[in-house]
Image (cartoon, rainbow, N blue to C red):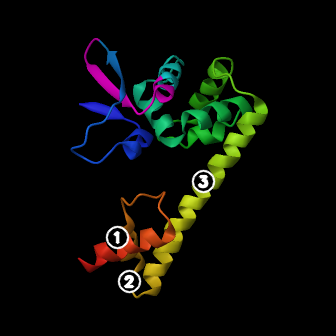
Amino acid sequence: MCSATANTLKRLPKTGEEAFVFTHLNVREDAMDLFAFYDKKELECFKQLTSVSGVGPKAALAILSRLSPEALAASVAVGDVKAITQAQGVGPKLAQRVVLELKNKLKIDLEEAVGILKEEDVASSRVSGSLSEATAALVSLGYTRTEAQNALKGADLSLSTEDLIKIGLKKLMS
């Protein structure tokens, strides 16, 4: 079995198509775990995260599923512990340790960090805005909110509102 971050899984081609990924084999006394990453930057970030005491592969995957390597570096640079705690299973103490131990390892300019964090906020608000607009449009067409949300579940959130509505309608019609 091979584990991967949510960011990697989103960027992979459809099932059955070839894909190139960077891998890391974690060997322990009782298990050998394989991890896949879309790009080398994510793999390097994973290795740096697992070098922090208390951060295992599972926590590192959770952090990189929530934050891109750039967003993680920016969060570490500005000391944004809250962003790191949004990862599943990562508490404030562990997030503080990540910030402290990686502050000198992840080289990023403070101005660049602030710019990256602003871009991430804009992108996430755009994505959630498109999804909520598409859900509202389906509800206004007479579907329940639950039906609309289920129809949009699993859709590519980078699509426009119009494309999300089309996908939702196709699922609801079938």
Residue tagged 2? 143
Picture coordinates of residue 72, whole percent (x, y): 60, 34
Residue at left offset 42%, top offset 87%? 141
Label 1 secondary element? helix
Neighbours of disc 1 within 10 Å: few (<14), some (14-19), many (20+)? many
Label 3 secondary element? helix
Q: Is residue 89 visible?
A: no
The numbered mark at residue 123 is 3
Nearer the N terminus, badge 3 or badge 1? Answer: 3
* Separation of marks 3 and 2 at Cα, in angstroms: 28 Å
Neighbours of disc 2 within 10 Å: few (<14), some (14-19), many (20+)? some
Label 2 secondary element? loop
Q: Which residues are magenta?
A: 29-43
* Separation of marks 3 and 1 at Cα, in angstroms: 22 Å
Residue flagged by tag 1: what amino acid is it? Ala
Q: Quadrant of residue 145?
A: bottom left
Q: Is residue 60 visible?
A: yes
Nearer the N terminus, badge 2 or badge 1? Answer: 2
Residue flagged by tag 3: what amino acid is it? Ala
Residue tagged 1? 151
**Residue placed farthest to the right in the image?**
111
Picture coordinates of residue 172, whole percent (x, y): 30, 77
Comparing 77 with 156, the one in front is 156
- Does 91 sit left or right of 56 as displayed? right
